[in-house]
Image (cartoon, rainbow, N blue to C red):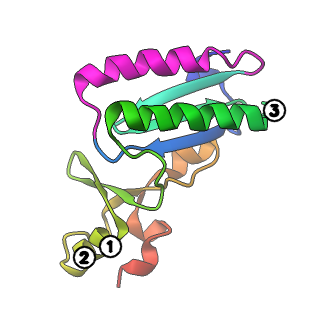
Amino acid sequence: MLTNYQNLSENAKVYLYPSSRKFYPNELEELDVKVKEFTSKWTKFSTSYKIEYQRFLLFFLEEDAVITTKIMDELAEFIFQLEKDYNITLLDKVNVCFKQGEYVQYQEMKRFRELIKKKSVSKKTIVFNNFIQTKYEFENEWEVPITNSWLSHLIT
């Protein structure tokens, strides 16, 4: 059942999908309706969702939720359909999302390494950890300086 994000425990599970581009304002309203409709099917556990920076789609499922293969298949099918509907990539978590000023950028790993070599990215650059697994990690470890991320080995 859809619930307020604040009501979920710190151990709520997170499924994060970074978009290869920002959603346009007209798409955000439609996306919100689609996600709300999709998550309303989950009636046996508490769930919530967020669309952050007009780019990240996050689903939060209460820690006691029994995540069946059927639920994961439905979620994957939903995400595949969103990719088609909006001509975006949502399932590639290895590409890098990072902040440049107030903007969030999305780059393929190869291109991101080039930005580091050109010093367009520094040790202070904020990157998004797309591998978070809980609400606590989302709130505390999602946006971090590159030196505190899985990408730290790329900075010399």
- Image position of 39 with respect to 97: above or below: above
Residue marked by disc 2: 114
- Alpha-carbon span between mark 2 and mark 1: 7 Å
Left or right of 29: which side holds 90?
A: right
Tell me the number on the disc at residue 66.
3
Q: Which is the main secondary structure of the residues drawn in magenta?
A: helix
Q: Quadrant of residue 78?
A: top right
The residue drawn where x is 39% and y is 35% is 84
As drawn, 88 above or below 27 = below
Q: Where residue 148 appears, x then y in whole percent? A: 47, 67
At label 3, counting other C-alpha atoms closer than 10 Å, the crowd grade (few under 14, some 14-19, many 20 or more) is: few
Q: Are marks 1 and 3 in contact (CB under 8 Å)?
A: no
Regarding mark 2 in the picture, which secondary structure is present there?
helix
Q: Amino acid at mark 3?
A: Val
Q: From where the camera sits, is residue 35 visible?
A: yes
Q: Position of residue 136 (x, y in %)?
A: 61, 43
Instruction: Answer whether labels 2 and 1 touch (C-beta < 8 Å).
Output: yes
Q: Is residue 54 visible?
A: no
Corner quadrant of residue 100: bottom left
Q: CA distance from mark 1 to mark 3?
A: 37 Å
**First to last magenta residue range:** 22-45
Q: Residue at x 25, y 69 (%)?
A: 121
Residue at left offset 36%, top offset 79%: 155
